[in-house]
Image (spheres, rainbow, N blue to C red):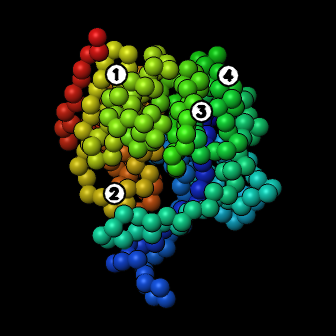
């Protein structure tokens, strides 16, 4: 079996998309659409699929139900060369599903069933399997009730002891008192932390991305913190520099999966050992590519497409030393 370079751990979902609607149906109204595609979503799967398109051997660790939707996720990933051998099956819960309604003039609506993700915990993770990888990426932390901070510390500490790079992203669905306390200790074992600006605000209580990043960095000055800001781009903070990155301008069809595609591009740069400025340009390109088509990963660039896009579209970064 080929060596898996990146293991993506976390949320697995089946996404049921509507074609773009002229408006949300009124009560009792039927609207006909050209297609209702069934696609794979969720932090772990989106990032893994994007990594596969970027040429990285990837495995997924998560949980689905013993149902047709679980079969669909596993088959979908297998067809794309992603290792699914460590996807567990829940005996109690069905596979997670999201209905996504797209309209021409308004933001998306979501109807979500959390399903088997609520049954995923540290006991579902094969540590011997993890030990063979170069990067472990956890997506959806804080929205996985059985994967608490103590469990994640155990996983990341295991990885760090073996020289494996640890990358963490979160999902913060609702405000919660002292939410930052659930991140404080695990960040000590994290190499790169990649929340978006809204999540960072809920965690820190701060509005400004630079201040948010400084709060996170105070828990581990050795890590890199990247705050993604949607159309405003992203900001990276390390102990000695701040890098501000604008976004690439592309036509938006569906913004689903943008953050996960950014994460995938960032992971590629880390694996390649690129300097941070180059990593951020590449991640910005892969993130931007996700909005070009319906679904979380349909529009994501291949590596060759991303490199060509970067060459053809200048992106000026601002770099500030920290003293």
- Mark 3 closeness class: few <14, some 14–19, many ≥20 residues within 10 Å: some
The residue positioned 55% from the left and 51% from the top of the image is 42
Residue that numbered label 3 is attached to: 182
For disc 1, the marked residue is 275
Measured from the top left, where is residue 160 in percent x and y?
61, 19
Q: Earlier in the sequence, mark 1 or mark 4?
A: 4
Q: Secondary structure at mark 2?
A: helix
In the image as oriented, which residue stretches furthest toward the top? 323
Q: Residue furthest front?
A: 177
Label 2 vs 4, first from the N-terminus: 4
Residue at horizontal 58 percent and vertical 40 percent from the top: 141
Q: Quadrant of the N terminus?
A: top right
Q: Which residue is mark 4?
A: 158
Residue where numbered disc 2 is placed: 292
Please tell me which of labels 1 and 2 falls first in the chain. 1
Q: Mark 3 to mark 2: distance in Å?
A: 35 Å
Between the residue at mark 3 and the residue at mark 4, the CA separation in whole angstroms equals: 19 Å
User: Within 10 angstroms of label 4, few (less than 14), some, or many (20 or more) residues?
Assistant: some
Residue 54 in view here: no
Query: Residue 105 at what x, y percent from top left?
Result: 30, 70
């Amino acid at each position: 079996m080929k060596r898996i370079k990146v293991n993506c751990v976390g949320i697995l979902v089946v996404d049921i998309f509507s074609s773009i609607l002229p408006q949300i149906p009124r009560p009792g109204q039927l609207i006909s659409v050209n297609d209702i595609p069934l696609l794979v979503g969720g932090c772990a799967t989106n990032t893994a699929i994007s990594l596969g398109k970027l040429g990285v051997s990837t495995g997924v660790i998560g949980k689905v139900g013993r149902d047709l939707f679980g079969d669909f996720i596993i088959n979908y990933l297998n067809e794309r060369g992603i290792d699914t051998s460590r996807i567990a099956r829940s005996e109690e819960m069905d596979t997670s599903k999201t209905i996504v309604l797209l309209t021409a003039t308004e933001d998306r609506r979501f109807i979500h069933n959390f399903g088997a993700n609520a049954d995923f915990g540290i006991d579902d993770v094969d540590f011997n399997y993890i030990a063979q990888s170069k990067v472990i990426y956890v997506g959806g932390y804080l929205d996985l009730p059985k994967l608490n901070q103590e469990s994640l510390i155990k996983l990341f500490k295991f990885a760090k002891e073996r020289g494996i790079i640890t990358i963490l992203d979160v999902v913060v669905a609702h405000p919660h008192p002292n939410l930052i306390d659930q991140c404080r200790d695990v960040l000590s074992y994290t190499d790169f932390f990649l929340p978006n600006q809204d999540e960072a605000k809920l965690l820190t209580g701060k509005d400004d991305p630079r201040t948010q990043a400084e709060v996170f960095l105070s828990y581990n000055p050795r890590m890199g913190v990247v705050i993604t800001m949607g159309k405003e781009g992203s900001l990276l903070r390390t102990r000695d520099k701040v890098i501000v990155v604008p976004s690439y301008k592309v036509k938006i069809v569906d913004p689903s999966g943008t953050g996960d595609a950014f994460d995938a591009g960032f992971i590629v740069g880390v694996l390649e050992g690129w300097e941070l400025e180059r990593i951020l340009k590449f991640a910005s390109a892969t993130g931007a590519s996700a909005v070009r088509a319906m679904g979380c990963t349909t529009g994501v660039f291949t590596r060759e497409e991303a490199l060509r896009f970067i060459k053809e579209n200048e992106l000026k970064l601002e770099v500030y030393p920290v003293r």
